[in-house]
Amino acid sequence: ATGMVILGADKHIRYVNPQYERQLGYSSSELIGQLPDRGLDSPDLYADLWQALEAGRKWSGRLSSRRRDGSVLHEQTTIAPICDATGGILGYVATLLDVSHLHAVEKRLQYLGAAIDSADECIQILGMDNTVIYVNPAYERQHGVRLADIVGAKPPTMMSAPEPNSDELRAMIVAVSRGESWRGTLKCTSSRGEPLTEDVSVSPIRDNKGMVTAYLIVKRDISEKLEMEQQLLRGQKLEAVGQLAAGIAHEINTPTQYVGDNIRFLKDSFREIVALIQRLNQLQGTATDGRIAATELARVLQDTDTDYLLTEVPTAIDQSIDGVDRVSRIVRAMKDFSHPATERTPLDINRAIASTATVASNEWKYIAELQTDFDMDLPAVPVMPGDFNQVILNMIVNAAHAIGEVVGDGGNGRGTITLATRRVQDQAEIRISDTGCGMTPETAARIFDPFFTTKAVGKGTGQGLAMAHNVVVLRHGGTITVESTPGAGTSFIIRLPLEVPDAGAAPSNSDSEAA
């Protein structure tokens, strides 16, 4: 299994065995009398080899040759001088073991090692007893530790998990204890006490029998990314409110105008009532024997037109109350839409969707009818209210724009936007449907891509649906899909878990420590 070559004192080949012929692809007749071809080795390596041999010493190392087919043969080589009784060198004998496969594996390991060392992600390998086997340089930099100081020891507190992340931490522990991979977002603290939010994936490492022997943890600090996303969401919300401001002002202005008109009417009417009371007081002062003449009383009442006041004053009061209620609903909707909470809190999504529709009413009221089909038994859903409201707003505005493509300004009839909720097993489903222009399958496949938009230049940034996908899928662990037919409308289906992922039964201590 080992190639053998004998060289003369002049370094020319005198003999090769059949194995070496097979390794190199040349016959012995083609090799004998030739100098060994070492063109693939560095000159320094070749010089060191012959310096050792000419000094009468054996040399061992790895050499490379070119096979007949052009491929490279890597050989673990040992060469020794053949000496006569006086120490004179008669030639050299070499044994050459083909290690090309081993060389390829070593190169792959070198590249893998270089990739791990160069990665921006923190990579950590923990043993079954939760001791550190390996951390890469990125982990050392981010957590302020050195591998030499922590290898073989349990790491410092890797994850601090206050609510709501404790649920995700428990879910991770259970998944890993079952031999499953897990990925999610966790709050953690570096050894320097710095708070971090990390995208974490944990995978079991198995031996050739399928037994878990260690855990691979890959972590990326996404604190800055999340902050940038929050800034983008806040900016997008401000932009949306700015775009809707004129419509909201119009919605508030209409009831405000007739409330003002009614109040002015009531003011004038009150002056007439005051004048009536004064006339009646005068008549009472001139009454004979406490009696007022019927003709006088009738004339006073007729001059004041009391029948008109009795009819119109209650109507003005009712209209004013209705106007104030309409303004209150709009303001309350704006307050609900602008909910400041950034952590998951239980939310009545039926009310949230209705409030958002009210905020966006000026976008759809002239071109579409709004229909709701809410499941009134749907429990509160744990969401980030501000982000959720922004997603629903984007969907309603997009639906209005799609209908506008069909009906124009409403002169060609009105479309329909349907907002529906229901429970589907352990998820809440929100369906936003429109009777707009619809989409081709090619367009529908790309709508969640960043910066992709079907709207005219200046009317869309291509970020609304991309951010909606990010909020629903990454922040809430839900799903968002689309059903659309060109010319027949579109439905977006959002599903959100009714509970933050729960770990269920607590795992054993060993599992918890290992995770």
Image (cartoon, grey):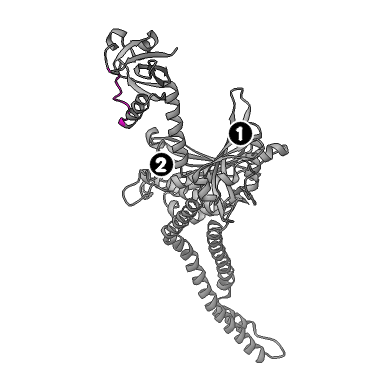
Residue 312 in magenta? no
Label 1: which secondary element: strand
Compared to residue 173, the image places residue 352 above or below, namely below
Amino acid carrying label 2: it is: Asp
Which span is picked out in magenta? Answer: 35-43
Say how many tags the image has. 2
Where does residue 456 sit, x and y in percent of width and height?
32, 47
Q: Give neighbour class at mark 2: few <14, some 14-19, many 20+ (Cα, 10 Å).
A: some
| Residue 503 in view, yes or no | no
Residue closest to the eye, 472 or 414? 472
Residue closest to the eye, 489 or 178? 178
Residue 314, quarter of the rendered image? bottom right
Which of discs 1 and 2 lies nearer the camera? The answer is: 1
Where does residue 249 sit, x and y in percent of width and height?
45, 63
In the rendered view, does 419 fall on the left or right side of 501? left
Amino acid carrying label 1: it is: Ala
Identify the residue under disc 1.
214
Residue 342, quarter of the rendered image? bottom right
| Residue 512 in view, yes or no | yes
Label 2: which secondary element: loop
Residue closest to the eye, 167 or 190? 190
Where does residue 28 sit, x and y in percent of width and height?
31, 8
Q: In which quadrant of the rendered image does the C terminus lie? A: top right
Residue 200, quarter of the rendered image? top right
Identify the residue under disc 2.
449
